[in-house]
Amino acid sequence: MSLDFGLNDVHVLITGAAGGIGLEAVHTFVQLGARVTAHFNSNIGELANLKNVVSIRADVRNEASVNTLLEKAGKQNGGPVSVLLVNHGIWPSNNAHVADMELSQWQNTLAVDLTGPFLLCKAYLQALRIAPQAVKDTASVIFVGSTAGKFGEANHGDYAAAKSALMYGLTPTLKNEIVSIAPRGRVNTVSPGWVATPMAQETLKDKAFVERALATTPLQKVATPADIAKQLAVIASPTLSGHVNGQNIMVDGGMEGRLLFPPSSQ
């Protein structure tokens, strides 16, 4: 039996596509025959070398910039976006207890990791209203969440709060709203645990940290970007996951929780 993902010639917009999970997702969706638009913020990186990908810069914190991103994607890549993969995000590497966190850090993390997804979904759904039926038939929004959104993460409350809002607030809300525009439209979240990405590189050099992070994970491994990208493709597929909607899918090796850090690290 051949496995058809049903993504050939489907327009997929991937945010935060310049590295890590995003870049791997770009390669994966291209291999499946999708028309990929890759968003980046400041550094285009390896995207500059990809011939079959449309790369567009945008500041996800800015509504006008996001609206322009969706407009350019439609004009430069064969029509409106059908699959919106909200992958971008920031994870401030400094440890900041809520009692000590600067308001500016909190506001910036939520602006990127939560307001950005809101603006993207708003622009996407508005464009979907007037899109051809073929685009609506494969409509899908996929958020990249995190185990931080499920279990919390000491010293990274800004990131945990934003991811939790995507996983448990926006996902179940939008899965009920998208169908008023696209009756077969779906909204899901794929939530990784620790992934060996450039954003996590420095943190994962600490062997003691990795041991604590994997202490409740049966598979005892840090995921690769490919582990996550493959799952994103499966969820985006209208043939493989056409009846999967409103779900938060944990791709975390079976993690069951977190160990508390020693008091001295608080």
Image (tube, rainbow, N blue to C red):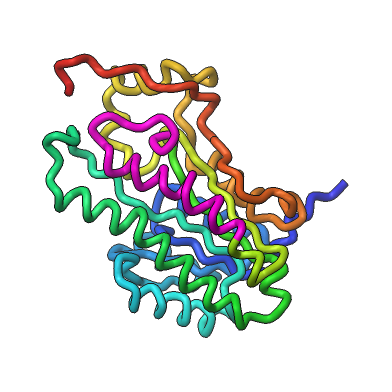
* Predominant secondary structure, magenta span: helix
Q: Is residue 244 rendered to the left or right of residue 163?
A: right
Q: Residue at x 49, y 21 (%)?
A: 256
* Residue 179 higher or lower than 94, as above or below: below
- Residue 190 image point, x, y percent: 54, 44
User: Which residues fall within the magenta stretch?
Assistant: 147-176
* Residue 229 higher or lower than 220, as above or below: below
Question: Residue 164 lies in magenta, yes or no?
Answer: yes
* Residue 51 higher or lower than 46, as above or below: below
- Residue 79 image point, x, y percent: 60, 81
Q: Is residue 85 rendered to the left or right of residue 17?
A: right
Q: Residue at x 51, y 69 (%)?
A: 37
Residue 135: quarter of image: bottom right
Q: Is residue 184 rendered to the left or right of residue 149?
A: right
- Residue 155 image point, x, y percent: 23, 32
Q: Residue at x 37, y 23 (%)?
A: 213
Q: Residue at x 77, y 55 (%)?
A: 239
Quarter in which the C terminus is drawn: top left
Can see residue 68?
A: yes
Can see residue 9?
A: no
Question: Residue 32 lies in magenta, yes or no?
Answer: no
